Image (cartoon, rainbow, N blue to C red):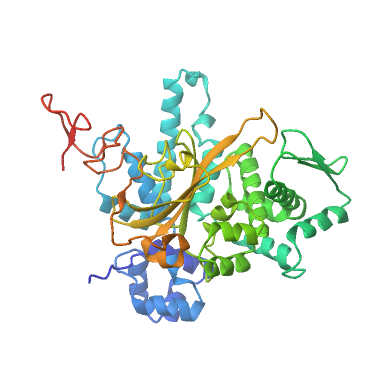
Amino acid sequence: MTVQKLYAGAKLREMRGRLRLTQKTFALKLGVSLPYLNQMENNNRPISAGVVLALAQEFGLDVTELTTGDSERIVADMREALADPVFTAPPPLADLRLAASNAPALARAFLDLHRAYRQSHERLASLDEALGRDDRNLAPSPWEEVRDFFHYCDNYIDAIDHAAEHYATAQGPDKPVESIAMATLEAQGIGLHASNTADLRHYDPSTKRLALSGRVSATTRRFQLLHQVALLTQNDLLEATLDLAQFHSPQARGIAKIGLANYFAGAALMPYTAFLAAADRERHDLERLSDLFDSSIEQVAHRLSTLQRPGAKGVPFFFVRVDQAGTVTKRHSATRLQFARFGGACPLWNVHQAFELPGRFLRQLAETPDGVRYVCLARDVSKSGGAFGAPVRRYAICLGCEIGHADRLVYADGLDLRGRFEPIGISCRICERPDCHQRSVPPLEKRLSVDPDRRGVIPYSIED
């Protein structure tokens, strides 16, 4: 069996920077020569097993950080960007991996540049007064900037996660977090009221009145209550995190603050240590975890995808939510599977079938073009408007992990893990499968052959 060499120079430099050590001191503590360390940090040599062991023993570092992080995400994002027709000859995959590993800052700058180009091109195409706009409009949209912030920090915010866990458990493991939140409001002289409006939550600081919608489910009200608690009690922590993120616009900062308060709410409802233990004990049964933590199925699935605390990581899951048009509205991956930044998800994915079979958990064994195999779980989720005639928002969620973790999932029981795996992709533009019957557009990295006298499922064939 061939052992894959570990090249993680950028991560090694980042670790040394966090420890505030010179190369000379770092090399001494790792038991290697200064030139050898320099070669590892520049990816001229792989990181040896001895160095990995020294990192764990000398510094107590979670060495899985060396093999996870931004590289796979950056490679997936660059492949999708380079599939744009503006690029005539995309570089080979090996070059992209080298750039993502050796020069991640440069790779992100390229992605920012392509995003600016794409947005400018879309504005021109839609005749949206593009010629009269100033240069500020070439920056990423606030929504995209916040999405990428969570994407590249593994959707795990350590300081906020710890703060939420402390808030929820400081008074003992048996005290309901909702009671703690109510006591917090009472201590600050804030009155809690039920409203009959479409607003999920409305806080008036002048009257110290918090109104939560009586139309929504109890789990949603509990979540919104904790969201407001985060804004009231954790503002300094939220602002410090936003300062570190250095968003480009006040709108992005505002959206991110909402996201961080949501993160606190979810982490307080499902405190890390207790939730991780329960997830392992219940073999990640979403319905059991939903009952144990008084949370919705979607909240539980999302929380499972955030269990990436260094030294205490859970199963690395991907989590995605799509609407009925197939547009991805939430996405996160702690696995090698990365989602398309633009457009919808692969139509062969079981997440789309969830709309056809409401209320059921759908299981799927899937394989991506890179040969990685996954167990996928999909289910529809509906968000009622809470009144007759009010619109119902319908989504489908999908949670999955690589097949190597299947024995830890109750949903893998009874599946033939040696049987057929559904061939799924990321985006038709970058999917290399030549025989997909659901292909919507040709892959831009392959040559096409068109024969007017022959028609298959699609009107062209893809050359190797």
Give the x, y percent position of residue 277: 57, 70
Q: Quadrant of residue 110?
A: top left
Q: Residue furthest left?
A: 453
- On the picture, is 172 further left or further right than 445? right
Is residue 401 visible to us here? Answer: yes
Q: Nearer the viewer, residue 189 or 345?
A: 345
Q: Is residue 245 above or below residue 168?
A: above
Q: Quadrant of residue 301?
A: bottom right
Is residue 160 visible to us here? Answer: no
Q: Give me the residue at 77% from left, 51% from top.
A: 232
Q: Nearer the viewer, residue 321 or 53?
A: 321
Q: Is residue 318 above or below residue 327?
A: below
Give the x, y percent position of residue 1: 22, 72
Give the x, y percent position of residue 240: 66, 54
- On the picture, is 289 further left or further right than 112? right
Q: From the image, which quarter does the C terminus lie in?
A: top left
Give the x, y percent position of residue 181: 78, 56
- On the picture, is 160 further left or further right than 424? right
